[in-house]
Amino acid sequence: MNVNGRPAEHEPAPGQCLRTHLREQGWFGVKKGCDTGDCGACTVHVDGQPVHSCIYPARRAVGHEVTTIEGLSGSEAAAGDDLHPVQRCFLQGQAFQCGFCTAGMVMTAAALPEEHAHDLPEALKGNLCRCTGYRPIADALRGTVPPVQSAEGPVGTDVPAPAGPDVVTGRARYTLDVEVPGALHAVLARSPHPSAWIRSVDAAPALAVPGVVTVLTWQDSPDVAYSTARHENREDDPDDTLLFDRTVRFAGQRVAAVVAETRAAAEEGCRRLVVDYDVLPAVFDPRAAIAPGAPLVHGDKADVAEALARRIHDPAQNMAAHISSRIGDLDAGLARAAETVELSFGVQRVQHVALETHAAIAWPEGEGVVVRSSTQVPFLTRDALCRLFDLPRDAVRVVSGRVGGGFGGKQEMFTEDVVTLAALRTGRPVQLEFTREEQFIATSTRHPMEITVRAGADADGALTALEVRVLSNTGAYGNHGAGVLFHSCGESIALYNCPVKHVEAVAAYTHTVPAGAFRGYGMSQTAFAIESTLDELARRLGLDPVELRRRNVVHPGDPMISIAGSHPDVDLHSYGLTECLDLVEAALDSGRGEPVPTGPGWSTGRGVGITMLDSSPPRGHVATARLVRGEDGGYTLFVGTAEFGNGTTTVHAQLAAAGLGTTADAIRVVSSDTALTGHDTGAFGSTGTMVAGAATLRAAQAMAALVESGAEGRLETEGRADGTPRTVAFAVHGLRVAVRAETGEIRVLQSVQAVDAGTVLNPRQLRGQVEGGATQALGAALHEHVDVDGTGQVTTRTLRNYHVPALGDVPATEVFFARTDDPLGPLGAKPMSEAPFNPVAPALGNAVRDATGVRLTRLPFTADRVHAALRAERLQHQTH
Amino acid sequence: MDLGTVEEFAPAALGEWQPGDAWLAGGTWLFSEPQPQLRRLLDLQAFGWPPLTAGDDGLEIAATCTLTELARYAAPAEWPAAALFRRCCEALLGSFKVRSLATVGGNLCLALPAGPMTALAAALDGVCTLWAADGTQRSVRASEFVTGNGTNVLRPGELLRSVHLPASALRSEMAFRRTSLSPHGRSAALVIGRRDGAGAVLTVTAATVRPVQLRFDRLPDAEELAAALDAAALPWHDDVHGLPAWRAHMTGLLAEDVRAELAR
């Protein structure tokens, strides 16, 4: 076998797939995304034909010519300007965010057979991108890259991502794209039972497997409880998790790690491990879980003092968190209403499906360890590891390479604790890479919620009462359970003026895969319920649904009220909501979009969803940036925050350039390494620009002052930001749809989103964030669902059974920016990474209601479910 | 994915098979799921079967013929039903990069309800030739090869050698309809109708756990078709790619579309 013109270093193993064979020879441009032939990130050419190398038997490639992304342009040592035409298109169009899918996209497009070139949706159905929403990819492939916005200065321009040349050539280094000589492989043995007590683990048969070095079980676990969730304030999450727990609380929970010289040996060791389980009763439904007599998920922590110390609301009732807030007199408010609507909604589990799975590699260094991980929060992970293993801060260094997508899923510690334990025990480097199946069964999902909303308004449409009841299923562990619950009852309610607001909310423990942080952090669930209810209320009052909302939304000067005591440091420091609504309505009126499908039975409708987002998480979010001017006058910016496709590296270079009065390409940005900057909370809660960017700007302004004062030689400045006080950002989504009741099909004819992100620092990147968020949300609203069966097992374990949007599945979203300027944000900017996800599902539900007269209340709206719901409604009408 | 338990990669040969072996065709499914029971892969390419052999009596498709080879087959004009080849190949959930490796035999043996090669072979009255480990051969109608969701008539060590499509079926008029929950998703209902001098046959796959054929001595009218579908009490499939009630409903709609097209 020749790889990129060079003879392969060795024969592949008999059962090896081509991807692994290539990666073990250092061709790291070949990515492992799904490992099942569904995502295309591993695409290479065999004798010029594109193949998914993860399902290509490596032995079959012997005697053939293999080309990877590294060899595409004909020269392995290709400089940035020696690119294949497809690479050039991707670079020119910035057709990537995290870039994990890019090599596979490029390799597929570069060898597209003629017969497929004219049907991109069909040609690219085996190439998934989770970040971009595909519009820039389609543009790059069609050669219709929009012109770059030009403006004076570094801000407000389409500065390209500094990593672009590395991303399109496969040189960008993600977590495991490093050679660590002598690294061992850890594989986790997982419980088949949702609820059990481990009587014993017999590791001897596993240790007898040649190559197995050690087996780690509950007996090796530090006796320190923690949460996999990471927040600035550790105490935001309950201490309900152990590295290896003797009690099993969900099917898929890790019970042991087998560490071996090869992954195959570690897998065999897992199969040989003998775990004796005492299987216990389990509860999967959140309503059943909080009923008296239910099996307790954390019954071992039910003692009141213990629960208090661990910050669990009530383990004896399976309640991880609880909110009860009553502002105003509900009965009086409802009595004053001319119309009242009460609706119950179900919002499903969805998975992040970042294309790079959770992965980490740790190696001992001095008295401590270095951990290279796919994380949004290197500093918080460092602190958690220090606490867990009782190590000083300087003994643990956490770094991340380029991170292949996050979406909230990597605001958790799922791998770093295991590799650290294993590296400390063995004294050798240890890596752990989750399979796609493990992502589904044993990491985290969006919190599924049952939500009931009761809303009343007077005849003019002014709200008189708003009641929201939420039952959130946090699964077996409370990671993000409380935070998501509080956030779900935050801005979605504070958005509206109403004298009466009642909230009752519970996060229930169940014996199911834990839920965690997911883009939107609880808001996508409640926004769906509240925005749908208000739309329904308007229709019953004979008012336009957007008009009803215009009459009730907060304006500058209005207090922000959701649950008592929340949002103390939040204010409407800038306000673009009215402009966003105008932009969306004008776009929907424009006549643009796809034509209504021909054929019988299609009805059309339009709908709008509105969401507001506080500009950073509550209770503190700290960022540090360090700017160094070298002896040669070159600038290097060290930031703590992580780059996972959100584009912050670009924005940081722009902000530093703005502060220094130079251009972005003069700044080299180094990110996410705990050894290089002071503490940084990390990249979550839409803080990459708002908080970390502010730190960068301050460092740059301080540097500019130093330079101004005539300082010479090597200079260094630091900037810090703490994310308070806070402002808000808005996102408004509009959809026009066609629905065919006979088949349940929904076609999106037009998708538009207007956002209030303050000063737009980088229009192309901002557009990309909105397009990507809207597409991910359309996927969640139309297709995606993680299913848990009646025995607690996750049944959707592969990408072929969990459908994320492909290129042909969703239309491009038209994106508009409100012209605002926020006094709190860096150079007037506001955050816009989570917000675009939130208003999409209610816009869709409202559009379907408009088209069919039927209110759909349970996500997702797959054709089979929509068909069933419409038919049930029809039958009900006939019987009345 | 890597199949870590596989210790040997050997050319396939008759009489070689033993427990722990798997016949390797394209590998696109075999390498897409953990296979901890396997110790050896027997590479069917070693047989060197010609992918497609046309004769007066029809078309012989080797089990190792890839979907792309089949889709690109230039059929003689008197075989209009060969237009199904491309339609069925593109009905595969996998991309063109999978279709260039995945084989007709592999798709049949996988026996998924949505298997488009099962649909094709059944609809065109294909006959499967099976080779047992001891070298004996038997023939099975393609419509009876798949017996349920993931099950087929193969015995341990037996392999699918080829599918023969009779010329009579290839000469007939056909109509094809499919639906799925997303534009390029896994087929949730796939209906193929065929009409020739001997009558009409409707083949339903994807919506049902195994292929079901309804035969008529002449093309039915809409009511007759609906009644026949009702009376057949089809074994509807239930998974994430479509609720059974919806599959049943869509099958009715697609079948009527197919019937109407054949009636034109």
Image (cartoon, rainbow, N blue to C red):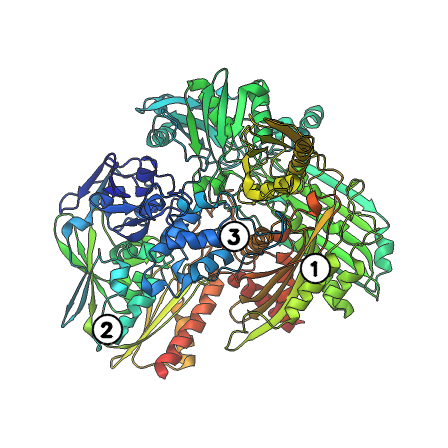
Name of the residue lying farthest toward the top = A367
Residue A662, image x, y percentages: 61, 42
For mark 1, what is the residue? Answer: A580
- Residue at the spot 53% in from the left edge and 59% down from the top edge: A147
**Kind of residue at badge 1:** Cys
Q: Residue A611: x and y, percent?
A: 69, 53
- Residue A132 is marked as 3
> Which element carries disc 1, helix, strand or loop?
helix
Picture layout, residue B218 above or below residue A818: below
Q: Earlier in the sequence, mark 3 or mark 1?
A: 3
Q: Is residue A230 above or below residue A498?
A: above
Subunit that carries the residue with mark 3: A
> Chain letter of disc 2?
B
Q: CA distance from mark 3 to mark 1?
A: 22 Å
Q: Do we see residue A669 in this rendering?
A: yes
Q: Nearer the viewer, residue A671 or A506?
A: A671
Residue type at mark 3 is Thr
Quadrant that contains the N terminus of chain A: top left
Numbered circle sitting on residue B170? 2
What amino acid is at disc 2? Leu
